[in-house]
Image: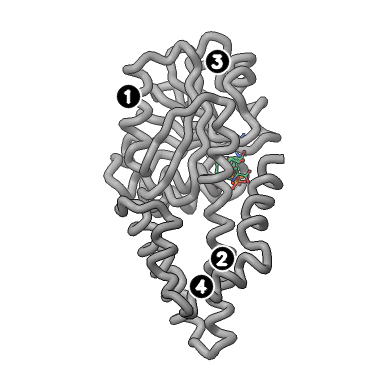
Amino acid sequence: MIGFIGAGSIGGAVITGLVKNGFNADEIIVKGGSSNRTKLLCEQLGFQMVKKIKQLEDTDVIFIAVGASAIDGVLKELKEIASDKLVVAFTGSASVANLKKILGSVKVAHAIPNTPVKVGAGFTGITYSEDFTDEDKKKIGSILGYTGQLVEVPENQLGILGTVAGCSPAFLDVFIEALSDAGVKHGLDRKLAYEAAIGMAIGASKLAKQSELNVSALKDEVTSPGGSTIRGVAALEEYGFRNAVIKAVDAAED
Ligand SMILES: NC(=O)C1=CN([C@@H]2O[C@H](COP(=O)(O)OP(=O)(O)OC[C@H]3O[C@@H](n4cnc5c(N)ncnc54)[C@H](OP(=O)(O)O)[C@@H]3O)[C@@H](O)[C@H]2O)C=CC1
Ligand SMILES: O=C(O)[C@@H]1CCC=N1
């Protein structure tokens, strides 16, 4: 059995990704917050919902998906039942040291998933406490593997990995929205503009993943000499697109 504390944007996305990609909902117990978000998700997915952290006693892995303001209270309650469990916190501001400070000898990990976990196409960075065994890591991998890629990194890289993969779905959404706006400005129907921009993002990403070439060579393949694309690329550079992306990552990191 696995447990979740918090089923908001990221907790809900991970739970959805698990169930929609074949993880048995009967093996998931969720303790939600004070709104009816968890109840609504429960009605869709069919996991077990509980009101108290103590009721997660029969689980062997617990994922914490509450925000910074709630995590200390959650950890203090969790300590009562967590001694033999693996605890993975998604809370952005958490750290292995801070989790250990409250949970003591409990094996803990800090992970930053991204919202595409919801469709099994996530990218999650994770740092384990030193006492995690290879078998423990395999267990976490066998669960989060349902939601996409899981990559172990040293904790000093987790923040930036979490920004590049975790915050950036929002950056890409802004790009897709802007591209659609441009299409509409030039006369495309809104729905078709979104379909084209989203279809392009999926296709270009798939090509980038499967190709032997790096992305700058893929860009070279689109930019015919004297053609329209290179003019567009030049305009992107003129308006500071590359620097805007770097500054967005700087701002998220800060
Ligand atoms: N959103 C994202 O893409 C990502 C977020 N994160 C991190 O995950 C954390 C949560 O973010 P996000 O999911 O976006 O935030 P949300 O506000 O969407 O979700 C947090 C959830 O925690 C629940 N909650 C609060 N207190 C408790 C409690 N005591 N017991 C059980 N549930 C509780 C709330 O329930 P209710 O609403 O019912 O009150 C809420 O649904 C943040 O620290 C964020 O940095 C990490 C990676 C990606
Ligand atoms: O904005 C946030 O707090 C989280 C961290 C990674 C993605 N979203």
Q: Which residue carries the number 1 mark? A: 138
Mark 4 crowdedness (10 Å alpha carbons): few <14, some 14-19, many ≥20: some
Q: Which residue carries the number 2 mark? A: 175
Q: Which residue carries the number 4 mark? A: 230
Q: Is residue 139 left or right of residue 56?
A: left
Residue positioned 62% across, 43% down in the render: 34
The kind of residue tagged 4 is Ile
Q: Which quadrant holds residue 137?
A: top left
Evaluate whether residue 50 shows in this view. Answer: no
Location of residue 217 in the rendering, given as x and y in whole percent from the top left corner: 41, 58
Task: Using the numbered discs, state the Cα–Cα distance from disc 2 to disc 3 in whole angstroms.
Answer: 46 Å
Task: Using the numbered discs, state the Cα–Cα distance from disc 2 to disc 4 in whole angstroms.
Answer: 18 Å
Q: Which of marks 4 and 3 precedes in the sequence?
A: 3
Q: Which of marks 3 and 1 precedes in the sequence?
A: 3
Question: Regarding mark 1 in the picture, which secondary structure is present there?
Answer: helix
Residue positioned 34% across, 17% down in the render: 134
Foreground mark, 2 or 3, reads: 2
Question: Regarding mark 4 in the picture, which secondary structure is present there?
Answer: helix
Location of residue 228 in the rendering, given as x and y in whole percent from the top left corner: 49, 80
